[in-house]
Image (cartoon, helix red, strand yellow):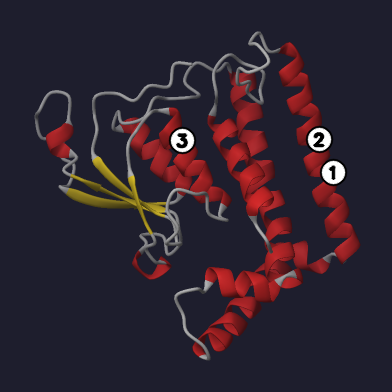
Amino acid sequence: MVTQSTNVNPDITVFRGFRETGQHVWSPYVIKLETRLRFAGVRYDTAAGSPKTAPKGKVPYIECRDLSASSPSGEANGFQQTVKIGDSAIIAKTLTEWGVLPDLNGALDPSKKLQDMALIALLENKLYFYHTWERWIQNYYTMRDHVLWPIPYPIRIIVGLLAYRANLAMLNGQGTGRFTEEEIAKSRREIWEAISAQLITSRSSSKGGDNEPFWVLGGEQPTEADTCLFGFIVSAWICAA
């Protein structure tokens, strides 16, 4: 697959919110971002970081160093020597514009681009909230102790209650919190069943062998939707909450 990075190679640190190294974290957006970088063969370091120091107030975010010195022409591109970027989608788009990452969707026709955007929207604007409800409302204590690991007791109890109330208010405002447990579970299952059916279809039409990767839209190369879907699949698989 044509996903090699360009010769623009800044020093990148991905702040993931957790201190574990060499393994995935629970956030689908962190996994999505790391998958995007790995598809392109871009090397990066990881660190825990904190929403307090994140550009958008959330993880993941990255820090790029000496970016201007890494330009293919060796000329100053107007980039800062050290820059922080927040939000997984904005990070991928910015690094693509800078030539660090290849444009995964550049060769898609309008119909495929719309399908790609629709799948990402389904995951990030719908399924995400079902999973947030499951984690923060149904499995609050497990989620609290994992996400708030740096905060000692008894402060963690207070911060956890604030986080619970904030997520509950957010989910009620967004709409997911107004459904019953059974309704949320049914909607969540319907999404995963639809994705499973699409993956089966894409796999059956793939030209690769049994051990070769295939892509959700059925093309010969991955798209942005593949990185997002991989993030949500792995996140749902490893999350204990």
Q: In the rendering, which numbered label is found on residue 190? A: 1
Quadrant of the image occupied by residue 44: top left
In the image, residue 225 above or below residue 126: above
Q: Residue at x 57, y 69 (%)?
A: 146
Tag 1: residue type? Answer: Glu
Which of 131 and 237 lies nearest the eye of the viewer?
Answer: 237
Residue 153, compared with residue 79, is above or below; it is below
Nearer to us of marks 3 and 1 is 3
221 with respect to 184 (left or right): left
Among the two numbered marks 3 and 1 on one chain, the one whose residue lies closer to the N terminus: 3
Residue with the mark numbered 3: 36
Q: Secondary structure at mark 3?
A: helix
> Dot 3, how many residues are within 10 Å of its Cα: few (below 14), some (14-19), or many (20+)?
many
- Confirm whether residue 73 shows in the render: yes
| Amino acid type, mark 2 | Ala
Q: Disc 3 residue type? A: Arg
Q: Secondary structure at mark 2?
A: helix
Q: CA distance from mark 1 to mark 2?
A: 6 Å
Are the residues flagged by discs 1 and 2 in contact, CB closer than 8 Å? Answer: yes
Rendering quarter of residue 142: bottom right
